[in-house]
Image (cartoon, helix red, strand yellow):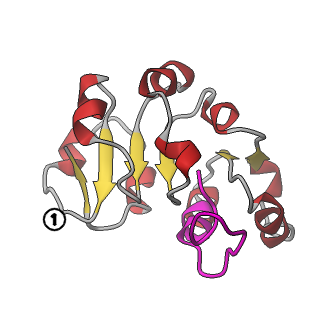
Amino acid sequence: MGLDTQDYTDDIREAPALTVMERLLDMGAVLQVYDPVAMDEVKNFFLDYPYPERIIYTSSPEEALVGAEALIINTEWDIFRRFDLSRIKALMANPLVFDGRNIFDPDKMKEQNIPYYYIGKPFDKKLNQVMNGISPSLLEVLPSRAVKK
Protein backbone atom coordinates (compact mmCIF):
# COMPACT_ATOMS: atom_id res chain seq x y z
CA MET A 1 0.00 0.00 0.00
CA GLY A 2 1.26 3.36 -0.96
CA LEU A 3 3.17 3.18 -4.22
CA ASP A 4 4.48 6.73 -4.59
CA THR A 5 7.52 8.39 -3.05
CA GLN A 6 5.45 10.31 -0.51
CA ASP A 7 1.82 10.89 0.30
CA TYR A 8 -0.25 13.43 -1.61
CA THR A 9 1.62 12.90 -4.90
CA ASP A 10 1.65 10.56 -7.88
CA ASP A 11 5.45 10.84 -8.18
CA ILE A 12 6.88 7.32 -8.33
CA ARG A 13 10.46 8.25 -9.25
CA GLU A 14 12.73 6.28 -6.92
CA ALA A 15 9.72 4.94 -5.00
CA PRO A 16 10.83 2.05 -2.73
CA ALA A 17 7.53 0.29 -3.45
CA LEU A 18 8.59 -0.32 -7.05
CA THR A 19 11.72 -2.19 -5.97
CA VAL A 20 9.74 -4.26 -3.48
CA MET A 21 7.13 -5.04 -6.13
CA GLU A 22 9.75 -6.06 -8.68
CA ARG A 23 11.49 -8.38 -6.23
CA LEU A 24 8.25 -10.00 -5.12
CA LEU A 25 7.10 -10.45 -8.73
CA ASP A 26 10.44 -12.01 -9.64
CA MET A 27 9.88 -14.50 -6.82
CA GLY A 28 6.46 -15.46 -8.14
CA ALA A 29 4.19 -13.37 -5.94
CA VAL A 30 0.77 -12.10 -6.95
CA LEU A 31 0.35 -8.52 -5.70
CA GLN A 32 -2.82 -6.69 -4.75
CA VAL A 33 -1.83 -3.02 -4.71
CA TYR A 34 -3.47 0.25 -3.81
CA ASP A 35 -2.48 3.91 -3.81
CA PRO A 36 -4.96 6.81 -3.66
CA VAL A 37 -3.18 8.76 -6.43
CA ALA A 38 -0.33 6.90 -8.14
CA MET A 39 -2.11 3.87 -9.59
CA ASP A 40 -1.96 5.08 -13.21
CA GLU A 41 1.74 5.88 -12.89
CA VAL A 42 2.46 2.43 -11.48
CA LYS A 43 0.39 0.74 -14.20
CA ASN A 44 2.47 2.57 -16.81
CA PHE A 45 5.70 1.62 -15.04
CA PHE A 46 4.82 -2.10 -15.11
CA LEU A 47 3.20 -2.07 -18.56
CA ASP A 48 6.10 -3.91 -20.22
CA TYR A 49 7.11 -5.91 -17.16
CA PRO A 50 7.22 -9.70 -17.70
CA TYR A 51 4.45 -10.40 -15.16
CA PRO A 52 1.81 -7.66 -15.45
CA GLU A 53 -0.98 -10.21 -14.94
CA ARG A 54 0.31 -10.81 -11.41
CA ILE A 55 -0.42 -7.23 -10.35
CA ILE A 56 -4.00 -6.65 -9.26
CA TYR A 57 -4.80 -2.94 -9.01
CA THR A 58 -7.52 -2.48 -6.41
CA SER A 59 -9.95 0.37 -5.88
CA SER A 60 -9.59 0.54 -2.09
CA PRO A 61 -7.18 -0.45 0.68
CA GLU A 62 -9.71 -2.96 1.98
CA GLU A 63 -9.95 -4.65 -1.42
CA ALA A 64 -6.15 -4.94 -1.50
CA LEU A 65 -6.21 -6.72 1.88
CA VAL A 66 -8.75 -9.41 0.98
CA GLY A 67 -6.98 -12.75 1.18
CA ALA A 68 -3.53 -11.11 1.39
CA GLU A 69 -0.65 -12.96 3.02
CA ALA A 70 1.13 -9.75 4.05
CA LEU A 71 0.60 -6.01 4.14
CA ILE A 72 3.53 -3.77 3.21
CA ILE A 73 3.12 -0.06 3.95
CA ASN A 74 5.33 2.13 1.75
CA THR A 75 3.74 5.58 2.06
CA GLU A 76 2.26 7.51 4.99
CA TRP A 77 -1.18 8.17 3.58
CA ASP A 78 -3.74 9.15 6.24
CA ILE A 79 -6.13 6.56 4.84
CA PHE A 80 -3.66 3.86 5.93
CA ARG A 81 -3.16 5.42 9.37
CA ARG A 82 -6.91 5.15 10.01
CA PHE A 83 -7.09 1.41 9.34
CA ASP A 84 -9.20 -0.53 11.80
CA LEU A 85 -6.69 -3.16 12.94
CA SER A 86 -9.37 -5.74 13.64
CA ARG A 87 -10.60 -5.25 10.07
CA ILE A 88 -7.07 -5.81 8.72
CA LYS A 89 -6.93 -9.05 10.66
CA ALA A 90 -10.33 -10.17 9.41
CA LEU A 91 -9.65 -9.41 5.73
CA MET A 92 -6.19 -10.93 5.42
CA ALA A 93 -5.47 -14.62 4.95
CA ASN A 94 -2.32 -14.18 7.02
CA PRO A 95 -2.30 -10.98 9.09
CA LEU A 96 1.34 -9.96 8.83
CA VAL A 97 2.37 -6.30 8.55
CA PHE A 98 5.62 -4.76 7.33
CA ASP A 99 5.45 -1.05 8.06
CA GLY A 100 8.01 1.00 6.16
CA ARG A 101 6.71 4.25 7.61
CA ASN A 102 6.02 3.41 11.26
CA ILE A 103 2.39 4.48 10.98
CA PHE A 104 0.98 1.91 13.38
CA ASP A 105 1.33 1.69 17.13
CA PRO A 106 3.29 -1.50 17.90
CA ASP A 107 1.39 -2.00 21.15
CA LYS A 108 -1.97 -1.90 19.37
CA MET A 109 -0.72 -4.38 16.79
CA LYS A 110 0.37 -6.65 19.63
CA GLU A 111 -3.06 -6.31 21.27
CA GLN A 112 -4.62 -7.51 18.00
CA ASN A 113 -2.08 -10.35 17.82
CA ILE A 114 -0.88 -9.16 14.39
CA PRO A 115 2.79 -9.88 13.66
CA TYR A 116 4.22 -6.40 13.06
CA TYR A 117 7.60 -5.46 11.61
CA TYR A 118 8.61 -1.85 11.34
CA ILE A 119 11.62 -0.14 9.85
CA GLY A 120 14.30 1.97 11.48
CA LYS A 121 15.22 0.05 14.61
CA PRO A 122 18.28 -2.18 15.08
CA PHE A 123 17.93 -5.56 13.38
CA ASP A 124 16.61 -8.27 15.65
CA LYS A 125 18.69 -11.41 15.09
CA LYS A 126 15.73 -13.52 16.13
CA LEU A 127 13.60 -12.15 13.26
CA ASN A 128 14.24 -15.18 11.06
CA GLN A 129 13.27 -17.52 13.91
CA VAL A 130 10.09 -15.57 14.58
CA MET A 131 9.20 -15.66 10.90
CA ASN A 132 9.82 -19.40 10.55
CA GLY A 133 7.01 -20.82 8.50
CA ILE A 134 6.51 -17.63 6.50
CA SER A 135 7.75 -17.61 2.93
CA PRO A 136 11.56 -17.28 3.14
CA SER A 137 11.53 -15.40 -0.15
CA LEU A 138 9.55 -12.62 1.52
CA LEU A 139 12.44 -12.15 3.94
CA GLU A 140 14.73 -11.34 1.02
CA VAL A 141 12.89 -8.11 0.24
CA LEU A 142 12.88 -6.84 3.80
CA PRO A 143 15.35 -4.11 4.59
CA SER A 144 18.15 -5.32 6.82
CA ARG A 145 16.94 -3.08 9.64
CA ALA A 146 13.46 -4.55 10.20
CA VAL A 147 12.43 -5.51 13.70
CA LYS A 148 9.41 -7.04 15.36
CA LYS A 149 7.92 -5.47 18.50
- Closer to us: 111 or 137: 111
Give the residue furthest to the bottom: 13
Residue sitting at x 44%, y 51%: 138
Where disc 1 sits, the SS reads: loop
Residue sitting at x 44%, y 53%: 137
Q: Which residue is mark 1?
A: 122
> Percent position (x, y) of residue 84?
48, 27
The correct choice, above or below, for 25 with respect to 70 in the image is below
Residue 12 inside the magenta-drawn segment? yes
Label 1 Cα neighbours within 10 Å, binned few <14 / some 14-19 / many ≥20: few
The correct choice, above or below, for 13 with respect to 65 in the image is below
Residue 15 inside the magenta-drawn segment? yes
> Percent position (x, y) of residue 91?
56, 23
Three-letter residue code for mark 1: Pro
Q: In this rendering, would 43 be left or right of 136? A: right
The correct choice, above or below, for 91 with respect to 69 in the image is above
SS majority, magenta: loop
> Percent position (x, y) of residue 132?
27, 39
Residue sitting at x 18%, y 62%: 123
The correct choice, above or below, for 128 with respect to 65 in the image is below
Report the magenta residues as a range: 1-21
> Percent position (x, y) of residue 23?
56, 64
Q: In this rendering, would 9 be left or right of 149? A: right
Residue sitting at x 72%, y 69%: 10
Q: In this rendering, would 89 be left or right of 12? A: left
Tell me the quarter of the picture where residue 22 sits. Answer: bottom right
The C terminus: image quadrant:
top left
